[in-house]
C-alpha cells in the first residue's frame, strides 16, 4: 500500500453552467450536461445524460469541460457525495468535482466505490454558510492509500460483477414493464371491445393518509408499519414497492390520520408531484400527500389500476386544485370515469401474472445485490 494525494493519481475538473436565460445554449442541445439533481435517487453506476443537454455554443460560453467516458463524477455541493461514472463523454455544472484517473495508478471503479463508502468523511471536509461545499484544492490534497493497480482491480472485481448483474436486471425490468403496458393497452384500450363506464368510487376504495406527531418518539421508535411519503413513491422507479424509508409504531398509527392499506393496493402521490404510483407488496400506511386506491378485485385489479393512473396522469393533474401547491382531492378523484370489462380483466391477469412474478423476483434480486454491495464496501473501505 502507498499513500497518495488524490491530485497525484487523478486530474480533477470542475464544471460550469451556461447562462440559463440564453435559450440557444440549451434548446436542441446534444452535449450531455449533468447536475447533482440528476443523481438524486439515481441508483445506477453509469450516467449518460441529465435532465438537460447543452448546445455547442452553450459549451463554449462557460468553463465546463468535456469529460471522457469512465470519468468518476463526485458532487461537491448541494449535496456532497453523489457519485457516478460517465457512461460516455459528457460535462457537468459547477456542483461537481470530476476525476479522470491515471490508469497506471488508480482504477476508476476502485475510486467510485471508495467515494461511496467514505461519503461522511468527504461531507465533513465541506465548508460554507449557505450550503456546504468541498473545494477542488481540498479534494486534491485528500490522501488515499492505494495498492497497485492490479490489486485494486482484484479487490473490487466482485463489486463490478454485482453492478453488471444489477444493470442487466434493470434492462430486464424495463422490458417487462413495457410488456405489461402493451398487455394493458391490448385489453383495456381496444376499440373492438365493449367496456362499461363506472365511477372510480364504485370499484375502488380511496383512502387518505396522515402523519403521527414527529415530537413523540413512541410513534416512530420500533416502527412496524411502512409509512409512505410522496418521495418514497417518486424515487421508487418501479411498479412494485416492498418498503418505505420510515416506519411508524402501533401507537403512531392509532394517534394519527394514517390508515392501514392492504397489500396489492395502489399508492399514488396526490400533491406537489401528482399521479406517480406504486403497488405496495406489504401492508402499509401513508402520509397526507398520498391517496391510496384499494381495488375491489372483481371489477379491477391493482395492475390495471396502476397503468390506468400512469396513462391518465394528465387527466388526474387537470382536476387538481391549490394556490401554494397543486393537490388532487379524494372527492374529485373518486368521480373520475374508468372503463372496465370483467372478461378482459380475467384475460389480462392470466397473461400478466407470470410477468409480474418474474418482475417481482428480479426486483428482489436487485434489492439483495444492493445489500450485498453495501456489506462488501463496508468490509473493504470503512
Image (cartoon, rainbow, N blue to C red):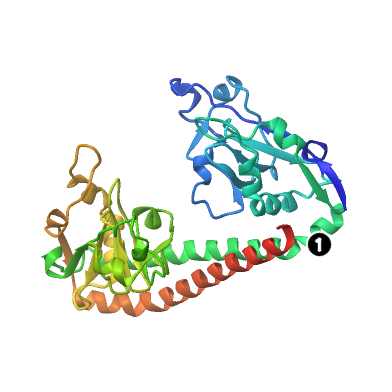
Residue 324 occupies quadrant: top left
For mark 1, does the 10 Å Cα neighbourhood hold few (<14), some (14 to 19), or many (20 or more) residues?
A: few
Residue 139 occupies quadrant: top right
Left or right: residue 143 compared with residue 268: right
At 35% across and 65% down in the image, what residue appears? 218
Q: Position of residue 201 (x, y in %)?
A: 13, 65
Q: State the residue in front, 360 or 328.
A: 328
Element on which disc 1 rests: helix
Q: Position of residue 272 (x, y in %)?
A: 30, 45
Q: Does 324 sit above or below residue 200?
A: above
At 71% across and 39% down in the image, what residue appears? 99
Left or right: residue 126 compared with residue 222: right
Q: Which residue is mark 1?
A: 154
Q: State the residue in front, 95 or 28.
A: 95
Quarter of the image with the C terminus in it? bottom right
Q: Position of residue 66 (x, y in %)?
A: 66, 32
Left or right: residue 95 compared with residue 71: left
Query: Can I make out residue 186 in this image?
Result: no
Left or right: residue 5 compared with residue 161: right
Q: Position of residue 46 (x, y in %)?
A: 61, 50
At 58% across and 67% down in the image, what residue appears? 371
Residue 375 occupies quadrant: bottom right
Query: Can I make out residue 188 in this image?
Result: yes
Q: Does 136 sit above or below residue 43?
A: above
Q: Number of labelled discs?
A: 1
Amino acid at each position: 500500500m502507498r499513500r497518495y494525494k488524490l491530485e497525484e493519481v487523478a486530474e480533477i475538473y470542475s464544471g460550469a453552467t451556461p447562462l440559463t436565460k440564453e435559450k440557444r445554449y440549451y434548446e436542441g442541445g446534444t452535449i450531455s450536461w449533468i447536475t447533482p439533481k440528476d443523481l438524486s435517487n439515481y441508483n445506477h453506476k453509469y450516467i449518460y445524460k441529465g435532465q438537460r443537454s447543452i448546445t455547442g455554443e452553450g459549451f463554449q460560453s462557460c468553463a465546463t469541460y468535456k469529460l471522457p467516458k469512465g470519468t468518476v463524477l463526485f458532487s461537491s455541493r448541494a449535496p456532497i457525495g453523489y457519485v457516478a461514472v460517465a457512461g460516455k463523454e459528457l460535462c457537468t455544472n459547477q456542483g461537481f468535482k470530476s476525476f479522470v484517473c491515471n490508469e497506471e495508478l488508480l482504477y476508476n471503479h476502485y475510486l467510485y466505490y471508495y467515494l461511496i463508502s467514505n461519503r461522511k468523511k468527504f461531507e465533513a471536509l465541506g465548508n460554507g454558510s449557505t450550503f456546504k461545499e468541498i473545494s477542488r484544492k481540498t479534494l486534491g490534497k485528500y490522501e488515499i492509500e492505494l495498492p497497485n493497480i492490479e490489486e485494486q482491480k482484484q479487490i473490487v472485481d466482485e463489486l463490478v460483477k454485482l453492478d453488471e448483474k444489477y444493470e442487466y436486471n434493470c434492462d430486464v425490468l424495463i422490458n417487462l414493464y413495457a410488456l405489461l403496458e402493451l398487455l394493458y393497452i391490448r385489453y383495456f384500450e381496444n376499440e373492438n371491445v365493449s367496456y362499461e363506464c363506472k365511477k372510480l368510487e364504485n370499484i375502488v376504495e380511496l383512502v387518505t393518509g396522515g402523519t403521527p406527531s414527529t415530537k413523540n418518539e413512541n410513534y416512530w421508535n420500533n416502527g412496524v408499519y411502512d409509512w409512505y411519503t410522496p418521495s418514497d413513491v417518486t424515487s421508487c422507479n418501479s411498479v412494485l414497492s416492498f418498503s418505505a424509508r420510515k416506519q411508524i409504531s402501533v401507537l403512531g398509527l392509532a394517534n394519527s390520520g394514517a390508515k392501514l392499506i392492504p397489500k396489492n393496493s395502489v399508492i399514488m402521490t396526490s400533491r406537489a408531484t401528482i399521479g406517480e404510483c406504486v403497488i405496495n407488496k406489504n401492508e402499509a400506511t401513508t402520509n397526507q400527500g398520498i391517496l391510496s386506491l384499494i381495488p375491489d378485485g372483481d371489477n379491477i385489479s391493482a395492475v390495471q389500476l396502476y397503468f390506468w393512473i400512469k396513462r391518465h396522469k394528465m387527466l388526474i393533474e387537470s382536476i387538481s386544485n391549490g394556490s401554494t401547491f397543486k393537490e388532487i382531492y379524494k372527492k374529485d378523484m373518486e368521480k373520475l370515469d374508468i372503463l372496465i370489462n370483467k372478461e378482459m380483466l380475467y384475460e389480462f391477469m392470466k397473461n400478466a401474472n407470470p410477468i409480474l412474478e418474474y418482475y417481482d423476483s428480479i426486483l428482489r434480486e436487485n434489492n439483495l445485490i444492493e445489500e450485498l454491495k453495501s456489506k462488501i464496501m463496508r468490509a473493504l473501505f470503512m
